[in-house]
Amino acid sequence: MSEAMPDTRVEKAPGSTATGGKRLLVEIRDLKKYFPIRSGIIIQREVAAVKAVDGVSFDIFEGETLGLVGETGCGKSTTGRTILQLYRATTLKGEPLRKMRRKMQMVFQDPYASLNPRMSVGRIVAEPLVVHNIGTRKEREERVAELLELVGLNPYFVRRYPHEFSGGQRQRIGLARSLALNPNFIVADEPISALDVSIQAQVVNLLQRLQQDLNLTYLFIAHDLSMVRHLCDRVAVMYLGKIVEVAESEELYTNPLHPYTQALLSAVPVPDPVVEERRQRIILKGDVPSPVNPPKGCHFNTRCPVSIDVCYEQDPELIEVQPGHWVACHRVI
């Protein structure tokens, strides 16, 4: 069971304050993705649902990078996959969805699992062109060579197979495939977390160069908060299927308002040893609740060090408390 209602309009959406007059590119409204839990051997009945994404709304502007961060299992990857309809929602189907998907692509987390080991590099990169019936065979071969050069790989690699490449090279192949249809929006789902540290900076620099050269827009899903600060224009913080805070990158890192964001950032090492020694680490008690049965009221109330009575009764709305800074917390709003 899943729901997504991007056609619902509100006066102002979380993160809808654009800088520099940028055009709104992606508009998400009340995005939901529930995975059914079934019981029974022959007749399976739905008895519950995992609320992986539970009413998420935000905007992404042309040419920017929006970071989506949070603990493992909070719904970050599910959000990205549902936006791209890799997890099918109920709004667009058939040909309209197929045409829209050409402008939206994904770079996956694991370069070892996202490439078909039985297909050559040339076939992997050309697959989107074949699926959408674009160009002749000759034109596709030329496009593949162009894409490989674009991501820093030798075009003569087209006849090789994924197992012949390193992790960083495989991620470049996946990136070349994602660029085949000239998309303007890419979901990068932790694209560097499976790579060696020595290779991560190369891939990040490549992403930034491609964004500048091709005017790409990224949704960058990550758990490395230091990398997010370096790469992203704005950051959205997610907890148990909900967005709890959205702000420009520097504003979020220097002035976090939600208790969960404050706890996350307190774990990020600071290069200055004097500052690091004075800093107080915020340790959250307990475990993340089950998305099958989230807490009543604020989803964070079971672990929040500053919760009050209203936190256990009402789910806080995401409110703009400062220009471009949105927070869902009763103690702040």
Image: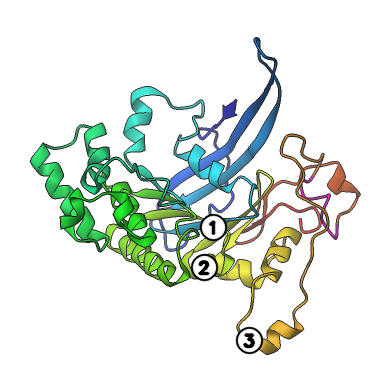
Q: Secondary structure at mark 2?
A: helix
Would you name the residue on which mark 1 appears? Answer: 222
Would you name the residue on which mark 3 appears? Answer: 272
Question: In which quadrant will I find the N terminus?
Answer: top right
Label 3 crowd bin: few (<14), some (14–19), many (20+), radius 10 Å: few
Rendered residue at 42%/54% (across/down) = 218
In primary-sequence order, the first of circles 2 and 3 is 2
Q: Is residue 117 magenta?
A: no
- Region rendered in magenta: 298-306
Residues under numbered marks 2 and 3 in contact, where contact means CB atoms less than 8 Å apart: no
Rendered residue at 60%/35% (across/down) = 32
Label 1 crowd bin: few (<14), some (14–19), many (20+), radius 10 Å: many
Query: How many angstroms separate mark 1 from mark 3 (CA)?
Result: 24 Å
Disc 1 residue type? Ala
Residue 174 in percent (x, y) is at 34, 51
Would you name the residue on which mark 2 appears? Answer: 227
